[in-house]
Amino acid sequence: MKIALVHDWFTGFGGREQVLKVLADLFGQADVHVLFYLPEQMPEFLSGRRVFTSFVQKLPALRNNYRYYLPLMPIAAERLNVQEYDLVISSSHCTAKGVRKNRSAIHICYCHTPMRDCWQKSEAETIRNTWPIWSRIAAGGVLRYLRQWDRKTSDRVDQFVANSSIVRERIKQIYDRDALVIHPPVDCSNFAINKHIGEFYLIVGNLMAYKRIGLAMEACRQANRKLIVIGDGPEGRRLRATATKGIDFLGYQPNEVVADYMSRCLAFLMPGEEDFGITAVEAQAAGRPVIALARGGALDSVRALGQAEKPTGVLFDQGNPSAMANAMAAFEHNAEKFNPEHIRQHAMDFDKSIFVQKFIDLVQLCLERKIQD
């Protein structure tokens, strides 16, 4: 079989890229199609592999302006040439799922979420507020066009795979399609329990607006607790400017440094609604609890204090600093109930090996269906 892996873009290495890496390892001879990439962000795991891009790759000032090219992404996805492949696997959070395959091919879409910029209110508002003034008038029309295109092209997918229960619900609501949940792969072997715990809370990830890092910063200020933030992104400069004493930004760090901080933190903080949240499971693989907003992927990955016999974290319902500070206090008051061995054992339910086996089984099932048809 000729296999194509389709990904939206490479502008950093996060959870979506971790999923693609495992798929690339699993399908070693597959070609990769991507709308565009920033050269310095091209993943090492694609070295030596055939990578094809769209016309977006040649647009001017791509590094700083690619988000303004969002209206062109549907056209770019449709022009990616995947006609010669028997199996197309898209890793999509934007327009990758909209590629045009040949009629005899199978298209499996691993959906991280339906187009976040269109369907989630906060992201749509960000577009309206951050686009150049001259283009904001057109923003409403552009969003309507993108939503119509996104919904219409869902019919090009033979099998949807959601990365969490909440994403499965979004797929049903927006596309009226059923999806199988296969949680993203976590390489638990990269993390280990540490007996020496520090006096700090931890956040790791790309600093994006929807992650609400500022909420966690204010919660730590209210609780007079130290916070370490690893990662960078569009919100990095603004967050650093507002940081108070006891909040340290370390920028991007090597994997082994991240694993070390995860193993020594009091708890890992997830203040925003994540589609899944791989880093929260990585922290649990290191035996550390997670304090998270009770929405999105956290409902799949965290066994909450007061709701489970062997809790792996604390969930809070209200998305404000006081609620998070109270959750931190509840965690500290019940620290003896969080057993690192139990927490790590729970994380193993999301190990990479499980993802690989479930995905192999899914591909086999899709092939059998195709033969029967």
Image (cartoon, helix red, strand yellow):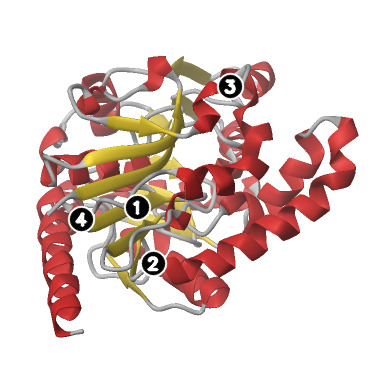
Q: Earlier in the sequence, mark 2 or mark 4?
A: 2
Q: Earlier in the sequence, mark 4 or mark 1?
A: 1
Task: Depth check: give the residue in front, 158 or 346.
Answer: 158
The span from disc 2 to disc 1 (Cα, nearest Å) is 9 Å
The span from disc 3 to disc 4 (Cα, nearest Å) is 35 Å
Any mark on residue 90, and which?
1
Marks 4 and 1 in Cβ contact (< 8 Å): no
The span from disc 3 to disc 2 (Cα, nearest Å) is 29 Å
SS of the residue under disc 1: strand
Q: Residues within 10 Å of mark 3 (few under 14, many from 20)?
A: some
Marks 2 and 1 in Cβ contact (< 8 Å): yes
The span from disc 2 to disc 4 (Cα, nearest Å) is 25 Å
Any mark on residue 157, and which?
2
* Residue 304 drawn at (x, y percent): 36, 63
Amino acid type of disc 3?
Answer: Leu
Instruction: Give the residue pinned by disc 3.
Output: 62
Q: Earlier in the sequence, mark 2 or mark 1?
A: 1
- At 57% from the left and 68% from the top, the residue drawn is 152
Q: Nearer the viewer, mark 2 or mark 4?
A: 2
